[in-house]
Amino acid sequence: MLVKRHAIAAVLGRLLAIGSGIAMTVVAARVLEPSGFANFSIFCTFVAGAGMACSAGLGVVGMRFLGSDSSERHRLAAQQTITTRILTVLVVADLLIAALIGVLGLWLSKHLFSGLDSVASAAAQMALGASAVGFTQAFSELLRGWQKPGYSALLGNQRGAPLACGAVAMGLLVISQFSEPIGWASAVWLYVSGYCLSTILGGSLIAGLVRLSPVDDLTEPWPAKLPCEPNFGKNGDDGNDTESTSLDRPELIAIAAPIGATLLLNFLSSQGDIFLVPFLDPSDVTPYVAARRWTTLVSMPLAVLNMTAGGLVSASLRKGSKVQLERVLRAGATIVGGFAGIVTIAAIVAPTFCLRVVFGPGYDGAATILGILAAGQWVLVSTGACGLVLSLTGNERVALSISAIGLLLLVLAGPLCATFFGPIGLATLLSMLVAGANAISCWACHQRVGILTLIDPTYLIRPHQLFRGLRSRDKK
């Protein structure tokens, strides 16, 4: 029952995060000037990545260890101790990194944002927003470890924050009734305020859970060792080769640092092109950012597939059901790839109409860019949950290497493409890198895990077998 409750809350939370994020983007595009919407979108992307840096992977570590089986004997004592240690390190890390981001923002804001009124104000917004996003993400993951999936879903995760984004969307709608047009700086302050609200709520919930733990239970000793998560190895073995850790503060930092670096690298490899817009002509920034935001609709089905397949991957590999797992993953990839394909075809055939339906008038210049970016995102979706499978089968380094190489190529070639070929060149480069990286990930998943995750064309020929694939079970 607990597993089912967590699964339902995870699905609903991810859907809320996606829906609230799209709602905020659509509302912002309609109530802000096009150039203001571009600045607002760049700020949101920057803060999302900076927030991952501020959280430093500590929330993920807490989520893993709070639910460890060995802590059941002294459950509340262990949870209180783990949470206290993580919060101590989190506060220092978050504030320190946010301060560095604020200093960096004094220089970076001049290049990222057009029509900037105050550099100091923009830097303060970047620092405060990054800190709030970092705390929100960490608190959400800690709440999942405390088996409070409903509250965790409300705060959100790396893909969005329903409470914060929903508050921003509602706030923009209300303000637009009394002040039009709205300045993008006001929208940014509203965005930062939404995440500060989430931080206060999440911190209050965590503090309440720690302080309300029975005093008698808190006198129990801290467990000498806690197990790490199972590692399924190269070929998806049984996962019994677990390691252990005392999780003192130095070791906590040692465990969290590579996790945080991996999350940040994955984010930059998928969103780093936004930070190359200073190399574009100022008149091309708004069309590119608008098209980039629109393509979220193409990749959204993959997020739905990943959030539903996570538990299935671990359970199937423990049972050794690779054939059944591949059949289900390919059936799921075919379904989400089909939906993404419809959206992609619409973006290629009628890009101007698609832009006007979602964002309203003023973004027609993004039509060509939209078709190019949408094609790359469709390849991302059509390869299925290969990245998820690699991450859950002990092949995180493979996924990390692929992301690192893609990011390096983007950093090296992106400025040249943007300078000499404009937004078309940057969009083409990004689509090629996205398609290539995910094709390699799909191949690596097949070679190292023995599972193919991309769409299955036979389901297109025999669609009646599609849902059989989803319901199939191996006979032992």
Image (tube, helix red, strand yellow):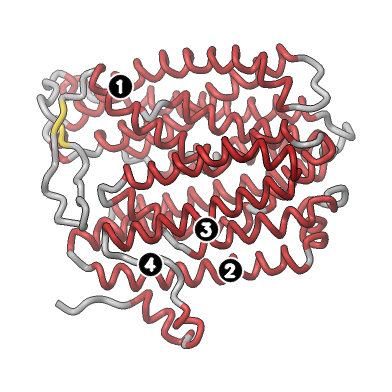
Tag 1 secondary structure: helix
Of residues 160 and 2, the one nearer the viewer is 160
Could you tell me how far apart the alpha carbons at marks 1 and 3 are, in whole angstroms?
33 Å
Q: CA distance from mark 3 to mark 4?
A: 15 Å
Rendered image quadrant of residue 77: top left
Q: Position of residue 339 (x, y in %)?
A: 58, 68
**Sequence-wise first label, 2 or 1:** 1
Identified by mark 4, the residue type is: Leu
Which of the numbered marks, if any, corresponds to residue 380? Answer: 3
Tell me the residue that label 2 is attached to: 339
Position of residue 86 in the picture relative to residue 25 (left or right) = left
Q: Amino acid at mark 3?
A: Leu
Q: Earlier in the sequence, mark 2 or mark 3?
A: 2
Residue at numbered disc 1 = 253
Image height of 189 relative to 379, above or below: above
Q: Which residue is mark 4?
A: 329
Expressed as whole percent of the image width and height from the top left, the position of residue 361 reads 87, 51
